[in-house]
Image (spheres, rainbow, N blue to C red):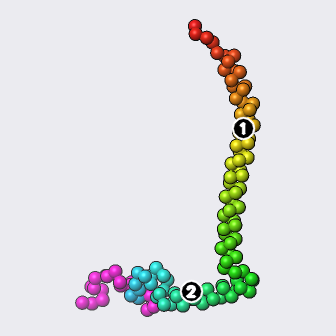
């Protein structure tokens, strides 16, 4: 069989593709390279970023504690806002409900 008459398989690459992209597995396509190359790149990138963070005196535990503190702050703001809204509703209801009740009583007609 010639190259042109061979059936295309899931593992084949289009003609003219660079040699380093030929016969790429689905895992390699997902990762963006072979697993060992990706692991090596991630290792060195983590080393550089980690060194930069240590130079800036940012520790991993500090980041975790800051995220927890931020979540607690947002949580407390949410409930504080709900409590304030409840105060507004209660203050408004002290005026609205009696006015509504008086209006209902004034418009009330007994059985006709």
Q: CA distance from mark 1 to mark 2?
A: 57 Å
Quadrant showing the C terminus: top right
Quadrant showing the N terminus: bottom left
Residue 13 in view (yes/no)? yes
Q: Could you say whether the residue bearing mark 2 is in a helix, strand or loop?
A: helix
Q: Does the magenta-highlighted stretch encompass residue 108?
A: no
Give the tally of numbered discs. Answer: 2
Q: Residue at x 44, y 87 (%)?
A: 21
Q: Residue at x 41, y 88 (%)?
A: 22
Residue 94 picture location, percent across and down? 74, 32
- Quick check: 25 above or below 104? below
Question: Splitting the image into 4 quarters, where does residue 69 fall?
Answer: bottom right
- Quick check: 94 above or below 38? above
Foreground residue among 25 and 1 = 25
Q: Residue at x 35, y 84 (%)?
A: 11
Q: Which residues are magenta?
A: 1-21
- Quick check: 77 above or below 11? above
User: Which of the numbered marks, if any, corresponds to residue 44?
Assistant: none
**Neighbour tally class for label 1: few under 14, some 14-19, many 20 plus, Cα within 10 Å:** few
Q: Residue at x 69, y 65 (%)?
A: 70
User: Which of the numbered marks, if any, corresponds to residue 90?
Assistant: 1
Q: Which residue is mark 2?
A: 42
Foreground residue among 53 and 59 = 59
Q: Could you say whether the residue bearing mark 1 is in a helix, strand or loop?
A: helix
Q: Would residue 112 appear left or right of 18 to someone viewing this image?
A: right
Choose mark 1 or mark 2, whichever is in front: 1
Q: Are marks 1 and 2 in contact (CB under 8 Å)?
A: no
Residue 81 picture location, percent across and down? 71, 50
- Quick check: 48 above or below 70? below
């Amino acid at each position: 069989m010639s190259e042109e008459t061979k059936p295309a398989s899931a593992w084949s690459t289009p003609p003219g593709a660079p040699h380093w992209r030929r016969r790429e597995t689905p895992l390699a396509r997902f990762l963006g390279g072979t697993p060992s190359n990706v692991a090596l790149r991630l290792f060195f990138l983590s080393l550089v970023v980690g060194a930069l963070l240590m130079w800036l005196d940012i520790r991993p535990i500090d980041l975790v504690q800051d995220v927890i503190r931020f979540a607690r702050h947002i949580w407390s703001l949410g409930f504080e806002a709900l409590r304030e809204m409840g105060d507004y509703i209660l203050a408004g209801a002290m005026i609205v409900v009696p006015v509504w009740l008086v209006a209902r009583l004034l418009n009330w007609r007994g059985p006709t």
